[in-house]
Image: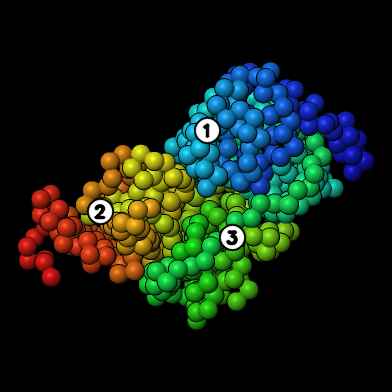
Amino acid sequence: MKSYIEEYKSKQVLAGEAVRVVKSGDWVDYGLLTAQPVMLDRALAGRKNDLRDVNIWSVLTLYPPRVLEADPAGESFVWNSWHFSGLDRKMMKSGIPVYYSPMRYSELPRYIRENIEPLDVALRQVAPMDRHGYFNFGPQNSHSKAVCDRAKVVIVEVNSNQPRCLGGYQEALHISEVDFIVEGNNNPLPELPAGTSTDVDRIIAGQIVEEMEDGCCIQLGIGSLPNAVGKMIAESDLKDLGCHTEMLADSYVDMCQSGKLNGRRKSTDPGKLAYSFALGTKRLYDFIDDNPQCAIYPVDYTNNPAVAASNERLVTINNAVEVDIYGQVCSESAGTCHISGTGGQLDFVLAAYQSRGGKSFICLPSCYCCSDGQMKSRIVSTLDKGAIVTDPRTVAQYIVTEYGKFNLKGKTTWQRAEGLINLAHPDFREDLVKAAEKQGIWRRSNLR
Protein backbone atom coordinates (compact mmCIF):
# COMPACT_ATOMS: atom_id res chain seq x y z
CA MET A 1 0.00 0.00 0.00
CA LYS A 2 2.86 2.37 0.77
CA SER A 3 4.13 2.19 -2.82
CA TYR A 4 0.63 2.98 -4.12
CA ILE A 5 0.40 6.02 -1.83
CA GLU A 6 3.76 7.25 -3.06
CA GLU A 7 2.72 6.72 -6.68
CA TYR A 8 -0.58 8.50 -5.95
CA LYS A 9 1.26 11.54 -4.58
CA SER A 10 3.65 11.62 -7.52
CA LYS A 11 0.72 11.76 -9.96
CA GLN A 12 -1.47 14.17 -7.99
CA VAL A 13 -1.83 17.61 -9.61
CA LEU A 14 -4.26 20.51 -9.68
CA ALA A 15 -6.98 20.44 -12.33
CA GLY A 16 -5.49 23.37 -14.22
CA GLU A 17 -2.15 21.62 -14.51
CA ALA A 18 -3.73 18.35 -15.63
CA VAL A 19 -5.66 19.83 -18.57
CA ARG A 20 -2.55 21.47 -19.99
CA VAL A 21 -2.02 18.21 -21.87
CA VAL A 22 -5.05 18.99 -24.08
CA LYS A 23 -4.07 20.51 -27.43
CA SER A 24 -6.05 22.01 -30.31
CA GLY A 25 -7.49 19.28 -32.50
CA ASP A 26 -7.43 16.66 -29.72
CA TRP A 27 -10.22 14.16 -29.08
CA VAL A 28 -11.14 14.08 -25.37
CA ASP A 29 -13.50 11.63 -23.64
CA TYR A 30 -15.68 12.98 -20.80
CA GLY A 31 -17.25 9.66 -19.89
CA LEU A 32 -20.90 9.22 -19.06
CA LEU A 33 -23.38 9.99 -16.32
CA THR A 34 -21.78 10.56 -12.91
CA ALA A 35 -18.30 9.94 -14.33
CA GLN A 36 -18.38 13.25 -16.19
CA PRO A 37 -15.61 15.49 -14.79
CA VAL A 38 -16.50 18.65 -12.90
CA MET A 39 -13.26 20.34 -11.78
CA LEU A 40 -11.42 19.22 -14.91
CA ASP A 41 -14.28 20.50 -17.06
CA ARG A 42 -14.10 23.88 -15.31
CA ALA A 43 -10.34 24.02 -15.81
CA LEU A 44 -10.58 23.08 -19.47
CA ALA A 45 -13.23 25.78 -20.02
CA GLY A 46 -10.70 28.26 -18.70
CA ARG A 47 -8.45 27.39 -21.64
CA LYS A 48 -11.05 28.37 -24.25
CA ASN A 49 -8.91 31.13 -25.77
CA ASP A 50 -5.92 28.80 -26.14
CA LEU A 51 -7.70 25.97 -27.95
CA ARG A 52 -9.58 25.26 -31.18
CA ASP A 53 -11.51 22.22 -32.42
CA VAL A 54 -11.18 20.08 -29.31
CA ASN A 55 -13.71 17.29 -29.86
CA ILE A 56 -15.33 15.91 -26.71
CA TRP A 57 -17.14 12.59 -26.38
CA SER A 58 -19.99 12.20 -23.90
CA VAL A 59 -22.90 9.87 -23.12
CA LEU A 60 -26.10 10.95 -21.35
CA THR A 61 -24.80 14.29 -20.09
CA LEU A 62 -25.97 15.08 -16.55
CA TYR A 63 -23.67 17.95 -15.52
CA PRO A 64 -23.98 21.25 -17.50
CA PRO A 65 -20.63 21.33 -19.32
CA ARG A 66 -18.63 24.43 -18.47
CA VAL A 67 -16.74 24.13 -21.76
CA LEU A 68 -20.00 24.78 -23.64
CA GLU A 69 -21.05 27.58 -21.32
CA ALA A 70 -17.70 29.23 -22.12
CA ASP A 71 -17.93 28.43 -25.85
CA PRO A 72 -21.61 28.19 -26.95
CA ALA A 73 -20.61 28.61 -30.60
CA GLY A 74 -18.56 25.41 -30.51
CA GLU A 75 -15.40 26.99 -31.92
CA SER A 76 -13.03 25.78 -29.21
CA PHE A 77 -14.97 22.73 -28.00
CA VAL A 78 -17.14 20.42 -30.11
CA TRP A 79 -19.64 18.30 -28.15
CA ASN A 80 -20.28 14.79 -29.49
CA SER A 81 -22.69 12.38 -27.80
CA TRP A 82 -23.23 8.64 -28.11
CA HIS A 83 -26.70 9.06 -26.54
CA PHE A 84 -28.64 12.24 -25.81
CA SER A 85 -29.91 13.16 -22.35
CA GLY A 86 -32.52 15.80 -21.57
CA LEU A 87 -29.65 18.23 -21.02
CA ASP A 88 -28.14 17.42 -24.42
CA ARG A 89 -31.52 18.13 -26.05
CA LYS A 90 -31.85 21.39 -24.13
CA MET A 91 -28.40 22.54 -25.27
CA MET A 92 -29.17 21.63 -28.87
CA LYS A 93 -32.49 23.52 -28.82
CA SER A 94 -30.74 26.59 -27.40
CA GLY A 95 -28.50 26.69 -30.47
CA ILE A 96 -25.35 25.10 -29.03
CA PRO A 97 -23.94 22.68 -31.63
CA VAL A 98 -24.38 19.19 -30.16
CA TYR A 99 -23.76 16.21 -32.43
CA TYR A 100 -24.90 12.61 -32.17
CA SER A 101 -23.00 9.49 -33.23
CA PRO A 102 -25.32 6.61 -34.18
CA MET A 103 -24.44 3.33 -32.56
CA ARG A 104 -25.72 0.02 -31.34
CA TYR A 105 -24.75 0.19 -27.66
CA SER A 106 -23.41 -3.36 -27.39
CA GLU A 107 -20.77 -2.44 -29.96
CA LEU A 108 -19.50 0.74 -28.29
CA PRO A 109 -16.36 -0.71 -26.64
CA ARG A 110 -15.31 -2.05 -30.04
CA TYR A 111 -16.07 1.32 -31.67
CA ILE A 112 -13.72 2.87 -29.11
CA ARG A 113 -10.95 0.36 -29.64
CA GLU A 114 -11.15 0.07 -33.43
CA ASN A 115 -13.26 2.69 -35.21
CA ILE A 116 -13.11 6.17 -33.71
CA GLU A 117 -10.48 8.84 -34.28
CA PRO A 118 -7.35 8.48 -32.12
CA LEU A 119 -8.30 9.29 -28.54
CA ASP A 120 -5.90 11.74 -26.92
CA VAL A 121 -7.17 12.33 -23.38
CA ALA A 122 -9.63 10.51 -21.09
CA LEU A 123 -11.15 12.48 -18.20
CA ARG A 124 -13.11 10.52 -15.59
CA GLN A 125 -14.67 10.94 -12.16
CA VAL A 126 -13.83 7.84 -10.11
CA ALA A 127 -14.20 6.50 -6.58
CA PRO A 128 -11.21 6.85 -4.21
CA MET A 129 -8.32 4.45 -4.71
CA ASP A 130 -8.62 1.21 -2.73
CA ARG A 131 -5.79 -0.54 -0.88
CA HIS A 132 -4.95 -2.55 -3.98
CA GLY A 133 -4.36 0.55 -6.07
CA TYR A 134 -7.63 0.52 -8.01
CA PHE A 135 -9.99 3.38 -8.83
CA ASN A 136 -13.54 2.09 -9.26
CA PHE A 137 -15.44 3.63 -12.19
CA GLY A 138 -18.56 3.97 -10.05
CA PRO A 139 -22.03 3.32 -11.50
CA GLN A 140 -20.90 3.35 -15.12
CA ASN A 141 -18.84 0.47 -16.40
CA SER A 142 -20.21 0.66 -19.98
CA HIS A 143 -17.19 1.38 -22.23
CA SER A 144 -15.02 3.04 -19.54
CA LYS A 145 -12.12 0.59 -19.66
CA ALA A 146 -12.06 0.65 -23.46
CA VAL A 147 -11.70 4.45 -23.33
CA CYS A 148 -8.86 4.33 -20.81
CA ASP A 149 -7.11 1.58 -22.77
CA ARG A 150 -7.29 3.64 -25.98
CA ALA A 151 -6.44 7.09 -24.59
CA LYS A 152 -2.89 8.40 -24.74
CA VAL A 153 -3.36 10.24 -21.42
CA VAL A 154 -5.72 9.22 -18.57
CA ILE A 155 -6.72 11.77 -15.92
CA VAL A 156 -8.97 10.82 -13.02
CA GLU A 157 -10.95 13.16 -10.77
CA VAL A 158 -11.54 11.51 -7.39
CA ASN A 159 -14.98 11.87 -5.79
CA SER A 160 -15.67 10.09 -2.51
CA ASN A 161 -19.41 10.16 -3.28
CA GLN A 162 -19.00 7.74 -6.17
CA PRO A 163 -20.31 4.32 -5.07
CA ARG A 164 -17.96 1.38 -5.36
CA CYS A 165 -19.65 -0.91 -7.85
CA LEU A 166 -18.49 -4.51 -7.77
CA GLY A 167 -17.89 -6.54 -10.94
CA GLY A 168 -18.36 -8.29 -13.20
CA TYR A 169 -15.16 -7.17 -14.81
CA GLN A 170 -13.52 -4.02 -16.18
CA GLU A 171 -15.14 -2.05 -13.35
CA ALA A 172 -11.92 -0.38 -12.18
CA LEU A 173 -8.67 1.21 -13.30
CA HIS A 174 -5.30 0.55 -11.67
CA ILE A 175 -3.11 3.47 -10.64
CA SER A 176 -0.38 2.21 -12.95
CA GLU A 177 -2.74 3.02 -15.87
CA VAL A 178 -3.35 6.60 -14.67
CA ASP A 179 -1.23 9.58 -15.70
CA PHE A 180 -2.66 12.34 -13.46
CA ILE A 181 -4.87 12.38 -10.35
CA VAL A 182 -6.98 15.37 -9.33
CA GLU A 183 -8.67 15.50 -5.95
CA GLY A 184 -12.28 16.47 -6.64
CA ASN A 185 -14.69 18.58 -4.61
CA ASN A 186 -16.66 15.45 -3.65
CA ASN A 187 -19.74 16.96 -5.23
CA PRO A 188 -23.06 15.10 -4.80
CA LEU A 189 -23.96 12.83 -7.69
CA PRO A 190 -26.67 14.05 -10.05
CA GLU A 191 -29.94 12.21 -9.60
CA LEU A 192 -32.63 11.30 -12.10
CA PRO A 193 -35.95 10.31 -10.51
CA ALA A 194 -38.10 8.16 -12.80
CA GLY A 195 -41.00 10.59 -12.70
CA THR A 196 -44.59 10.04 -11.68
CA SER A 197 -46.35 7.26 -13.54
CA THR A 198 -49.53 8.24 -15.35
CA ASP A 199 -52.79 6.28 -15.53
CA VAL A 200 -51.80 5.29 -19.07
CA ASP A 201 -48.41 4.06 -17.80
CA ARG A 202 -50.14 1.88 -15.22
CA ILE A 203 -52.59 0.41 -17.75
CA ILE A 204 -49.72 -0.48 -20.10
CA ALA A 205 -47.67 -1.86 -17.21
CA GLY A 206 -50.55 -4.10 -16.18
CA GLN A 207 -50.75 -5.60 -19.66
CA ILE A 208 -47.04 -6.43 -19.55
CA VAL A 209 -46.99 -7.87 -16.04
CA GLU A 210 -49.83 -10.26 -16.92
CA GLU A 211 -47.53 -11.73 -19.60
CA MET A 212 -44.84 -12.52 -17.05
CA GLU A 213 -44.30 -15.65 -14.98
CA ASP A 214 -42.14 -16.83 -12.10
CA GLY A 215 -38.46 -17.00 -13.00
CA CYS A 216 -38.54 -14.30 -15.68
CA CYS A 217 -35.38 -12.26 -16.22
CA ILE A 218 -36.09 -8.55 -16.61
CA GLN A 219 -34.62 -5.66 -18.57
CA LEU A 220 -36.21 -2.26 -18.04
CA GLY A 221 -35.49 0.87 -20.03
CA ILE A 222 -35.61 4.43 -18.76
CA GLY A 223 -38.67 6.50 -17.86
CA SER A 224 -41.91 6.52 -15.93
CA LEU A 225 -43.44 3.59 -17.81
CA PRO A 226 -40.70 1.01 -17.08
CA ASN A 227 -40.70 2.36 -13.53
CA ALA A 228 -44.44 1.62 -13.32
CA VAL A 229 -43.73 -1.95 -14.44
CA GLY A 230 -41.11 -2.38 -11.71
CA LYS A 231 -43.40 -1.05 -8.99
CA MET A 232 -46.24 -3.28 -10.18
CA ILE A 233 -43.95 -6.31 -10.11
CA ALA A 234 -42.88 -5.42 -6.56
CA GLU A 235 -46.55 -5.55 -5.53
CA SER A 236 -47.35 -8.73 -7.50
CA ASP A 237 -47.26 -12.43 -6.63
CA LEU A 238 -44.36 -13.10 -9.00
CA LYS A 239 -41.23 -14.66 -7.52
CA ASP A 240 -37.68 -15.76 -8.31
CA LEU A 241 -37.21 -13.04 -10.92
CA GLY A 242 -33.81 -12.15 -12.36
CA CYS A 243 -32.11 -9.03 -13.66
CA HIS A 244 -29.96 -8.76 -16.77
CA THR A 245 -30.09 -5.18 -17.97
CA GLU A 246 -28.23 -2.27 -19.46
CA MET A 247 -29.48 0.25 -16.90
CA LEU A 248 -30.17 -0.32 -13.23
CA ALA A 249 -32.89 2.00 -11.91
CA ASP A 250 -34.70 2.59 -8.62
CA SER A 251 -37.46 0.15 -9.60
CA TYR A 252 -34.97 -2.71 -9.26
CA VAL A 253 -34.46 -1.71 -5.64
CA ASP A 254 -38.23 -1.98 -5.16
CA MET A 255 -38.26 -5.46 -6.68
CA CYS A 256 -35.29 -6.63 -4.59
CA GLN A 257 -36.56 -5.27 -1.31
CA SER A 258 -40.02 -6.80 -1.90
CA GLY A 259 -38.36 -10.22 -2.31
CA LYS A 260 -39.48 -10.65 -5.92
CA LEU A 261 -36.04 -10.44 -7.50
CA ASN A 262 -33.33 -12.87 -6.37
CA GLY A 263 -31.87 -14.26 -9.60
CA ARG A 264 -32.04 -17.88 -8.48
CA ARG A 265 -33.16 -19.16 -11.88
CA LYS A 266 -30.76 -17.17 -14.05
CA SER A 267 -28.37 -18.91 -16.42
CA THR A 268 -25.83 -16.09 -16.38
CA ASP A 269 -24.65 -14.55 -13.09
CA PRO A 270 -27.12 -16.52 -10.91
CA GLY A 271 -28.14 -14.56 -7.84
CA LYS A 272 -26.76 -11.32 -9.28
CA LEU A 273 -28.24 -8.15 -10.72
CA ALA A 274 -26.14 -7.84 -13.88
CA TYR A 275 -26.00 -4.30 -15.30
CA SER A 276 -23.74 -1.89 -17.17
CA PHE A 277 -24.66 1.45 -15.60
CA ALA A 278 -26.98 2.79 -12.90
CA LEU A 279 -29.02 5.96 -13.08
CA GLY A 280 -31.52 7.11 -10.48
CA THR A 281 -31.65 8.59 -7.01
CA LYS A 282 -29.35 8.45 -4.00
CA ARG A 283 -31.39 5.49 -2.80
CA LEU A 284 -30.17 3.53 -5.82
CA TYR A 285 -26.56 4.69 -5.45
CA ASP A 286 -26.57 3.63 -1.79
CA PHE A 287 -28.03 0.25 -2.77
CA ILE A 288 -25.32 -0.60 -5.32
CA ASP A 289 -22.42 0.67 -3.18
CA ASP A 290 -20.17 -2.29 -2.30
CA ASN A 291 -23.17 -4.62 -2.77
CA PRO A 292 -22.13 -8.17 -3.74
CA GLN A 293 -25.67 -8.83 -5.03
CA CYS A 294 -24.89 -6.48 -7.92
CA ALA A 295 -22.42 -7.12 -10.75
CA ILE A 296 -21.48 -4.29 -13.12
CA TYR A 297 -20.16 -5.26 -16.56
CA PRO A 298 -18.97 -3.60 -19.75
CA VAL A 299 -21.83 -3.07 -22.16
CA ASP A 300 -20.52 -5.56 -24.70
CA TYR A 301 -21.41 -8.22 -22.11
CA THR A 302 -24.76 -7.02 -20.77
CA ASN A 303 -26.10 -5.97 -24.18
CA ASN A 304 -24.68 -8.84 -26.19
CA PRO A 305 -27.88 -10.50 -27.45
CA ALA A 306 -26.35 -13.98 -27.21
CA VAL A 307 -25.40 -13.45 -23.55
CA ALA A 308 -28.70 -11.84 -22.56
CA ALA A 309 -30.73 -14.44 -24.49
CA SER A 310 -29.07 -17.31 -22.63
CA ASN A 311 -31.37 -16.38 -19.73
CA GLU A 312 -34.70 -18.11 -20.26
CA ARG A 313 -37.92 -16.06 -20.21
CA LEU A 314 -36.07 -12.78 -20.79
CA VAL A 315 -38.61 -9.94 -20.74
CA THR A 316 -37.45 -6.60 -22.13
CA ILE A 317 -39.45 -3.39 -21.81
CA ASN A 318 -38.64 -0.22 -23.73
CA ASN A 319 -40.30 3.00 -24.91
CA ALA A 320 -40.99 4.41 -28.37
CA VAL A 321 -41.88 7.75 -29.94
CA GLU A 322 -44.06 6.32 -32.70
CA VAL A 323 -44.83 3.05 -34.50
CA ASP A 324 -46.15 2.80 -38.04
CA ILE A 325 -48.71 0.26 -39.23
CA TYR A 326 -45.94 -1.84 -40.82
CA GLY A 327 -44.37 -2.36 -37.40
CA GLN A 328 -41.39 -0.03 -37.76
CA VAL A 329 -40.43 1.48 -34.40
CA CYS A 330 -38.98 4.97 -33.98
CA SER A 331 -37.59 5.60 -30.49
CA GLU A 332 -35.01 8.30 -31.04
CA SER A 333 -36.36 11.21 -33.08
CA ALA A 334 -39.45 13.24 -33.88
CA GLY A 335 -38.98 13.53 -37.60
CA THR A 336 -35.52 15.00 -38.02
CA CYS A 337 -35.50 16.41 -34.48
CA HIS A 338 -33.13 14.20 -32.51
CA ILE A 339 -34.33 13.03 -29.08
CA SER A 340 -32.09 10.29 -27.70
CA GLY A 341 -30.44 7.43 -29.61
CA THR A 342 -30.68 3.74 -30.42
CA GLY A 343 -28.90 2.90 -27.19
CA GLY A 344 -29.47 -0.71 -26.16
CA GLN A 345 -33.06 -1.01 -27.33
CA LEU A 346 -32.31 -2.98 -30.48
CA ASP A 347 -29.90 -5.23 -28.54
CA PHE A 348 -32.61 -6.24 -26.09
CA VAL A 349 -35.40 -6.52 -28.68
CA LEU A 350 -33.22 -9.10 -30.43
CA ALA A 351 -32.19 -10.81 -27.19
CA ALA A 352 -35.70 -11.27 -25.80
CA TYR A 353 -36.97 -13.03 -28.90
CA GLN A 354 -33.89 -15.28 -29.02
CA SER A 355 -34.43 -16.20 -25.36
CA ARG A 356 -36.38 -19.38 -24.73
CA GLY A 357 -39.83 -18.16 -23.65
CA GLY A 358 -38.66 -14.53 -23.92
CA LYS A 359 -40.82 -11.56 -24.85
CA SER A 360 -39.91 -8.08 -26.05
CA PHE A 361 -42.29 -5.19 -25.40
CA ILE A 362 -42.20 -1.77 -27.05
CA CYS A 363 -44.54 0.55 -25.13
CA LEU A 364 -46.04 3.92 -25.93
CA PRO A 365 -49.17 5.94 -25.18
CA SER A 366 -51.57 5.84 -28.13
CA CYS A 367 -51.46 9.63 -28.61
CA TYR A 368 -49.95 12.86 -27.37
CA CYS A 369 -50.96 16.52 -27.09
CA CYS A 370 -49.04 19.16 -29.05
CA SER A 371 -48.15 22.57 -27.63
CA ASP A 372 -51.13 24.04 -29.49
CA GLY A 373 -53.50 21.60 -27.80
CA GLN A 374 -53.96 19.39 -30.86
CA MET A 375 -53.94 15.64 -30.19
CA LYS A 376 -51.85 13.41 -32.47
CA SER A 377 -51.55 9.65 -32.79
CA ARG A 378 -48.36 7.74 -31.97
CA ILE A 379 -49.62 4.85 -34.13
CA VAL A 380 -49.10 6.27 -37.62
CA SER A 381 -49.61 5.19 -41.23
CA THR A 382 -45.96 5.89 -42.03
CA LEU A 383 -43.21 7.25 -39.82
CA ASP A 384 -42.81 11.00 -39.85
CA LYS A 385 -40.51 12.34 -42.56
CA GLY A 386 -36.94 11.96 -41.37
CA ALA A 387 -37.87 9.71 -38.41
CA ILE A 388 -35.22 7.17 -37.45
CA VAL A 389 -36.09 3.46 -37.54
CA THR A 390 -34.77 2.12 -34.24
CA ASP A 391 -36.28 -1.37 -34.55
CA PRO A 392 -37.01 -2.68 -38.06
CA ARG A 393 -40.39 -4.29 -38.65
CA THR A 394 -38.65 -7.67 -38.88
CA VAL A 395 -37.43 -7.64 -35.27
CA ALA A 396 -40.15 -5.89 -33.22
CA GLN A 397 -42.35 -8.28 -31.22
CA TYR A 398 -45.05 -6.93 -28.86
CA ILE A 399 -46.31 -3.36 -29.31
CA VAL A 400 -48.33 -2.11 -26.32
CA THR A 401 -50.56 0.93 -25.77
CA GLU A 402 -53.34 1.56 -23.28
CA TYR A 403 -55.70 -0.05 -25.81
CA GLY A 404 -54.01 -3.43 -25.85
CA LYS A 405 -50.99 -5.34 -27.09
CA PHE A 406 -50.17 -6.98 -30.40
CA ASN A 407 -47.50 -9.52 -31.36
CA LEU A 408 -46.07 -8.71 -34.78
CA LYS A 409 -44.17 -11.96 -35.21
CA GLY A 410 -45.44 -14.09 -38.07
CA LYS A 411 -48.02 -11.54 -39.20
CA THR A 412 -48.67 -10.36 -42.75
CA THR A 413 -48.72 -6.66 -43.60
CA TRP A 414 -52.53 -6.59 -43.50
CA GLN A 415 -52.60 -8.42 -40.17
CA ARG A 416 -50.08 -5.95 -38.79
CA ALA A 417 -52.11 -3.02 -40.02
CA GLU A 418 -55.25 -4.40 -38.38
CA GLY A 419 -53.54 -5.24 -35.09
CA LEU A 420 -51.70 -1.94 -34.78
CA ILE A 421 -54.68 0.20 -35.77
CA ASN A 422 -56.61 -1.48 -32.96
CA LEU A 423 -53.93 -0.14 -30.57
CA ALA A 424 -54.48 3.43 -31.72
CA HIS A 425 -56.78 5.91 -30.01
CA PRO A 426 -60.32 5.39 -31.43
CA ASP A 427 -60.37 8.95 -32.80
CA PHE A 428 -57.57 8.08 -35.25
CA ARG A 429 -58.54 4.59 -36.37
CA GLU A 430 -60.75 5.57 -39.31
CA ASP A 431 -58.02 7.71 -40.87
CA LEU A 432 -55.48 4.93 -40.30
CA VAL A 433 -57.77 2.44 -42.06
CA LYS A 434 -58.07 4.79 -45.04
CA ALA A 435 -54.29 5.16 -45.15
CA ALA A 436 -53.83 1.37 -44.96
CA GLU A 437 -56.28 0.93 -47.85
CA LYS A 438 -54.38 3.49 -49.92
CA GLN A 439 -51.09 1.76 -49.08
CA GLY A 440 -52.50 -1.61 -50.15
CA ILE A 441 -52.20 -3.31 -46.75
CA TRP A 442 -55.86 -3.47 -45.72
CA ARG A 443 -58.52 -6.12 -46.37
CA ARG A 444 -62.03 -4.69 -46.17
CA SER A 445 -63.17 -7.75 -44.22
CA ASN A 446 -61.07 -6.49 -41.32
CA LEU A 447 -63.15 -3.39 -40.73
CA ARG A 448 -64.89 -3.69 -37.40
Please tell me which of labels 3 and 1 falls first in the chain: 1
Query: Given this view, does label 3 or label 1 mark the residue nearer the observer?
Result: 1
The way the protein has been coloured in the rendering is rainbow
318 or 91: which is nearer to us?
Answer: 91
Q: Please give left or right for residue 27 compared with residue 331 in the image.
A: right
Query: Given this view, does label 1 or label 2 mark the residue nearer the observer?
Result: 1
| Label 3 Cα neighbours within 10 Å, binned few <14 / some 14-19 / many ≥20 | some
Q: What residue type is labelled 1?
A: Ile
Residue 355 visible somewhere in the drawing:
no
Residue 165 lies in quadrant: bottom right
Q: Which residue is drawn at 69% across and 54% down?
A: 166
383 or 406: which is nearer to us?
Answer: 383
Q: Which amino acid does label 3 sit on?
A: Pro
Q: Please give left or right for residue 274 compared with residue 213 in the image.
A: right
Q: How far apart are marks 1 and 2 (CA)?
A: 32 Å
Pointer 2 residue? 380
x then y, percent, for residue 224: 49, 63
User: In terms of secondary structure, where does tag 3 sit?
Assistant: loop
x then y, percent, for residue 64: 63, 41
Kindly check if marks 1 and 2 are in contact, taking CB atoms under 8 A apart as contact.
no
Pointer 1 residue? 96
Give the farthest residue toward the right.
2
Give the farthest residue toward the bottom.
237
Please tell me which of labels 1 and 2 falls first in the chain: 1
Q: Residue at x 85, y 47 (%)?
A: 131
| Label 2 Cα neighbours within 10 Å, binned few <14 / some 14-19 / many ≥20 | many
Q: How many marks?
A: 3
Question: Residue 193: which numbered mark, if any?
Answer: 3
| Label 1 Cα neighbours within 10 Å, binned few <14 / some 14-19 / many ≥20 | some
